[in-house]
């Protein structure tokens, strides 16, 4: 018997079947944008000239990815079908909305030739001359400006390799800057540095390029070379907003705080600043507030950060700094100045996100930034960027490599020395700073009895990461004999699965010894097995309130918080427990298992594996084996990839457009 023909089979004449179009439309209607984009891309690959398939791809990208991605797809469609009014109209719409005005004018000319556009105003000669005028006083050709617009399309859609190729040889300031920017984000750092230096040499007033040349020298570990560029950067007068931002940003990166503040004030008095507004002004105000904060001027910093947020309400750095100022009553010595997309190659971050936990270490090793650059962005980044830098430095502790000094530069300070220094500075939380010290210990880069310094939130403190003694002696009963018998019976009943009878005995104990920690903890375990999660949490909070040092309750509650993704709260619960000089064997299995779970959730697989290996070495009895199985089950529940990958995932959907003109 022959098969019935599929209603998704391609129709004659090279057209998609109606069912294929409707499948994408259904996905769009259901807001399943990833699948809609994938299906629409496949249709366009098979039917590149089909208007309906292309329009669906534009809609899917616009709704599910970004307007920039849709604009680039519209351009590619129009290039394939240069005489298609539908393709040109779509590109014209996107180009106008994206302020790609010269490209829009070129598309409008094509539409007029086809008779599909009438009565639309053309750009005036004076308007065209103004658009072609360059910051250095020269004039670009219309062809150069149009090529810049096309390169910008690729840059905004994160096609960095395409942008770098298209902008190569376009001899105008904006194109040179964006080509260097594209090279950086594709990971071709040395080429990006050469491109920015070349852009500055062609136009001495291009402070945006000079800032990027300075930061890329830092990226490559050449602090001496970076400081050499700080001299002309500090002396210059910014001629436009992009240059003013770059000037202050570069000086702050190199910690020339007074020069940064002076440059910020000069730029505010410039003629061009009178009509400035929008996101770029917000970033410049944020940097000015950072300079004021580093110089100790709380009032000026507060005012500038508030102005920045008025211009751009979602500016995380300004909000983070204002919160710190409100909390501490003093301007941050290390204010948040930069978001991740300003300082890390976007292409690498995307690859890191795609790698997941399996290839995470290999992707981390792909980043060529010097250890000193990671220190720089840790000190100047917002909370997310600081997380990146800390995780990368901890990762590099395990390599313990000895790098050669950069050509013409000084020997590079390596991760171990940097991590020690960062722990002593008022940056991040006390838990994060202690985490840096633990990373040193886990990597074997601090002595077993070495005293280490860290900033405890108020002052420098000394801490010794003591090697813990594990003991097996039976824990002496602290209950009357009859209640101790009830406790033992309840444990047996719990193991046998008779939770009702076990609870009855625990309640009898609690009636005579209210808030007895073991009874409350075991009752919480019963609630967990019954699926009564909220009651389990209430009991754990109750026992911790009554007995703050009760390790098992703290570990069990931390387990729940890790599962919820509340890793900072879990860290708070576990803080200090590993520093106890003695742990019972049961406490060790509970604590190290929970710590391993947290490490796994944060993507620190090596530390998790080390902790579990130490537990395996402790196994001597059947009960130890059972406790090990419980610890392994905890770790297995943790989210692989962890906080670093979660940070990547949270960043990418809201990443800002990387291009600047």
Image (cartoon, rainbow, N blue to C red):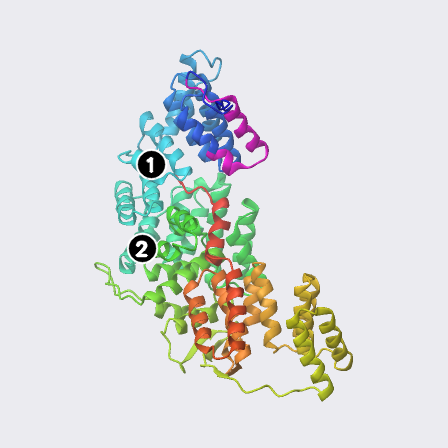
- Tag 2 residue: 368
Say if 189 sits above or below 455 in the image.
above
Q: Which mark is residue 162?
A: 1
Residue 547 drawn in magenta: no
Q: Is residue 592 visible?
A: yes
Q: Quadrant of residue 609?
A: bottom left
**Residue 430 appears in view:** no
Task: Name the secondary structure under disc 2.
Answer: loop
The stretch of residues the image draws in magenta is 14-38
Quarter occupied by the C terminus: top left
As drawn, 447 above or below 23: below
Mark 1: few/some/many CA within 10 Å (<14, 14-19, 20+): many
* Residue 479 locus on image (x, y percent): 70, 86
Q: Mark 2 touching mark 1, by CB under 8 A?
A: no
Where residue 14 sits: x, y (%)? 41, 19
Mark 1 lies on a secondary structure that is: helix
Residue that sits furthest to the front in the current view: 1
User: N-terminal of the two: label 2 or label 1?
Assistant: 1
Residue drawn at x 65%, y 69% is 525
Q: Is residue 368 left or right of residue 62?
A: left
Cα distance between the residues tagged 2 and 1: 22 Å
Which is the main secondary structure of the residues drawn in magenta?
helix
């Amino acid at each position: 018997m022959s098969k019935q023909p599929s209603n998704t089979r391609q129709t004659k004449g090279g057209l998609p079947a109606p069912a294929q179009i409707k499948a994408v439309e259904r996905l769009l209607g259901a807001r399943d944008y990833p699948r809609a984009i994938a299906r629409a891309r496949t249709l366009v690959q098979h039917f590149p000239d089909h208007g309906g398939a292309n329009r669906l791809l534009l809609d899917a990208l616009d709704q599910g990815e970004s307007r920039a991605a849709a604009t680039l797809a519209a351009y590619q469609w129009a290039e394939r079908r240069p005489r298609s009014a539908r393709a040109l109209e779509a590109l014209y719409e996107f180009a106008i909305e994206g302020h790609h005005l010269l490209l829009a004018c070129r598309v409008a000319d094509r539409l007029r030739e086809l008779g599909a556009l009438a009565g639309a105003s053309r750009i005036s000669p004076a308007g065209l001359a103004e658009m072609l005028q360059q910051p250095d006083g020269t004039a670009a050709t219309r062809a150069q400006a149009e090529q810049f617009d096309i390169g910008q399309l690729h840059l905004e859609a994160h096609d960095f390799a395409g942008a770098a190729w298209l902008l190569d040889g376009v001899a105008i300031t904006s194109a040179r800057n964006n080509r260097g920017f594209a090279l950086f984000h594709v990971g071709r750092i040395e080429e990006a540095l050469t491109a920015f230096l070349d852009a500055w040499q062609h136009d001495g007033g291009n402070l945006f390029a000079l800032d990027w040349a300075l930061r890329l020298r830092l990226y490559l570990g050449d602090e001496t070379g970076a400081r050499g560029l700080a001299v002309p950067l500090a002396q210059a007068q910014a001629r436009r907003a992009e240059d003013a931002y770059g000037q202050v940003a570069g000086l702050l990166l190199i910690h020339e705080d007074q020069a940064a503040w002076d440059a910020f004030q000069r730029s505010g008095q410039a003629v061009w600043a009178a009509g400035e507004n929008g996101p770029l002004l917000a970033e410049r105000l944020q940097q000015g507030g950072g300079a004021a904060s580093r110089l100790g001027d709380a009032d000026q910093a507060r005012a500038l950060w508030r102005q920045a947020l008025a211009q751009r309400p979602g500016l995380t750095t300004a909000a983070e700094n204002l919160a710190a100022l409100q909390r501490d009553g003093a301007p941050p010595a290390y204010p948040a100045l930069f978001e991740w997309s300003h300082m890390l190659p976007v292409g690498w971050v995307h690859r890191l996100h795609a790698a997941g936990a399996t290839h995470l270490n290999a992707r981390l090793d792909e980043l060529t930034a010097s250890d000193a650059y990671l220190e720089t962005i840790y000190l100047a980044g917002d909370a997310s960027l600081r997380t990146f830098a800390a995780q990368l430095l901890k990762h590099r502790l395990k390599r313990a490599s000895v790098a050669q000094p950069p050509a013409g530069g000084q020997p590079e300070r390596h991760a171990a020395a940097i991590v020690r220094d960062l722990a002593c500075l008022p940056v991040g939380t006390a838990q994060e700073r202690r985490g840096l010290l633990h990373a040193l210990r886990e990597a074997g880069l601090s002595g077993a009895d070495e005293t280490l310094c860290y900033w405890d939130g108020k002052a420098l403190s000394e801490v010794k990461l003591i090697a813990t003694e594990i003991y097996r002696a039976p824990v002496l009963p602290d209950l009357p004999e009859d209640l101790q018998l009830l406790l033992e019976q309840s444990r047996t009943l719990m193991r046998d699965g008779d939770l009702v009878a076990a609870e009855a005995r625990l309640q009898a104990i609690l009636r005579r010894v209210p808030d007895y920690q073991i009874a409350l903890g075991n009752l919480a375990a019963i609630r967990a097995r019954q699926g009564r999660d909220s009651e389990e949490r209430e009991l754990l909070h109750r026992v911790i309130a009554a007995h703050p040092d009760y390790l098992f309750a703290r570990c069990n509650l931390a387990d729940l918080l890790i599962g919820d993704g509340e890793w900072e709260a879990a860290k708070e619960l576990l803080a200090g427990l590993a520093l106890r000089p003695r742990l019972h064997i049961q406490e060790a299995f509970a604590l190290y298992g929970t710590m391993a779970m947290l490490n796994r959730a944060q993507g620190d697989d090596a530390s998790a594996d080390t902790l579990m290996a130490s537990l395996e070495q402790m196994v001597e009895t059947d009960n130890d084996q059972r406790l090990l199985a419980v610890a392994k089950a905890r770790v297995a529940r943790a989210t692989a990839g962890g906080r670093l990958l979660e940070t990547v995932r949270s960043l990418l959907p809201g990443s800002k457009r990387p291009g600047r003109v």
